[in-house]
Image (cartoon, grey):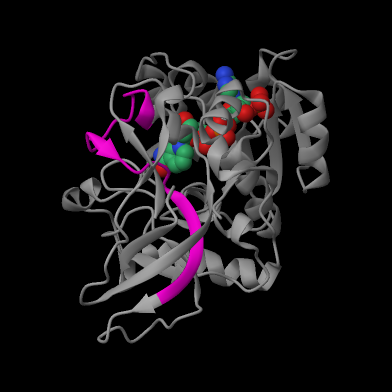
Amino acid sequence: MKAYQYRMGEPISALQIVDLPMPKVGPGQVLVKMHAAALNFRDIMVVTGQFPRTAQEVIIPLCDGAGEVVEVAGDVTTLEVGDRVTPLYNQRWMAGEMQDADTAYSIGGCLDGVAAEYRVFGEMGVLKFPDHLTYEEAATLPCAGVTVWNALHGPCPLSAGDTLLTLGTGGVSIHAVQLAHAAGAEVIVTSSSDAKLARAKALGADHVINYATTPDWDVAVREITGGRGVDHVIENGGGATMLRSIRSTRRGGWVHIIGLIAPGEIDPVHILLSGVHVRGQEVGSREMFAAMNRSLAQSRIKPVVDKVFAFDQLPEALGQLGSGQHFGKLVLAIP
Ligand SMILES: NC(=O)c1ccc[n+]([C@@H]2O[C@H](COP(=O)([O-])OP(=O)(O)OC[C@H]3O[C@@H](n4cnc5c(N)ncnc54)[C@H](OP(=O)(O)O)[C@@H]3O)[C@@H](O)[C@H]2O)c1
């Protein structure tokens, strides 16, 4: 079968399609014919050595994908041939809080990922996805989608009428716009592009701020919320944006630390004085993924796929992701 393989330390341009042996199904496992894989900023971090977890020396990259079950082991009871599934980002985190032992089980980094024609997973390592989604749309869910679900519906659930601020218009942020809007929240989005902000409004964003032309965007957020501040922030930036995110948040509100795009440092005194909750998180569990799928099936939300690349265009697709021109998700078709 064809797959991408990446050796740590090589440039993205060195990513190559190779022939690998067809994976074999063992007890409790299923064989999945992958049909699509979605790209995440995290994939760039993996292949440039910035991923904050130990990655395999040689890996099949990409963590987000969708495919069809084509073979099941005799002892598999919950899946059958023909099921349309998405592999879990973390193959071991099933429910509750993530445990330290789970952290080495993310695919497309610690374990082989989905940029391959076929992959074998444990029965509990994949989930059926809602019928109204295409493979390309479903491929956006395991990392970016579940991350947003964890932030919005984790230990501090968002309620209808709450305000949510989400930074940028990449994969995570656009999932946040759609899911928070569907949950009845008032949504504020920032972007460096007015054209992208117009697209975010069409998806349900209530307020938009261009952070390039409004560098004091935290002041604008306070004005929009009548001085109160938002209840939740999807903090996709990092150290460089965190102080403004905290200043955008009401006392007792939640800043979900998700992204590491804009590095920087912050003095903890700002957290202390603001009285906000700052919560780090790594994607989410199978239980969260299943809850999100039920919600998507009900709301009929379709994730935003900005562009689909051919399988042999992965280096080019990662280059486009790094340039930040996209809106929502970039996806790789797997023939
Ligand atoms: N913790 C987790 O579980 C988890 C899970 C998924 C992703 N992540 C992280 O979350 C971040 C976003 O991931 P992604 O896949 O959505 O990335 P992405 O699709 O590449 O989107 C990145 C977007 O961030 C915006 N951006 C860049 N610099 C910014 C700044 N200084 N201020 C505000 N926005 C800025 C840009 O939006 P505009 O073009 O609109 O300006 C850009 O399109 C990444 O750091 C990724 O590693 C973490």
183 above or below 188? below
53 on left or right of 140 = left
Residues shaded magenta = 46-70
Quadrant holding ligand 1?
Answer: top right
Residue 134 coordinates in the image, percent (x, y):
65, 63
**Residue at 45%, 81% in the rendered image:** 81
Q: Is residue 48 inside the magenta stretch?
A: yes
Image quarter of residue 302: bottom right
Give the quadrant of the N terminus: bottom left
**Residue at 37%, 84% in the rendered image:** 78
Residue 152 coordinates in the image, percent (x, y):
52, 52
Image quarter of residue 321: top right
55 on left or right of 79 = left
Residue 294 coordinates in the image, percent (x, y):
56, 72
Mark count: 0
Give the quadrant of the C terminus: bottom right
305 on left or right of 64 = right
206 above or below 322? below
Specify whether residue 71 is in view. yes
Given residues 302 and 121, the one toward you in this image is 121
Q: Is residue 64 inside the magenta stretch?
A: yes
**Residue at 56%, 54% in the rendered image:** 158
Given residues 114 and 276, the one toward you in this image is 114
Given residues 31 and 200, the one toward you in this image is 31
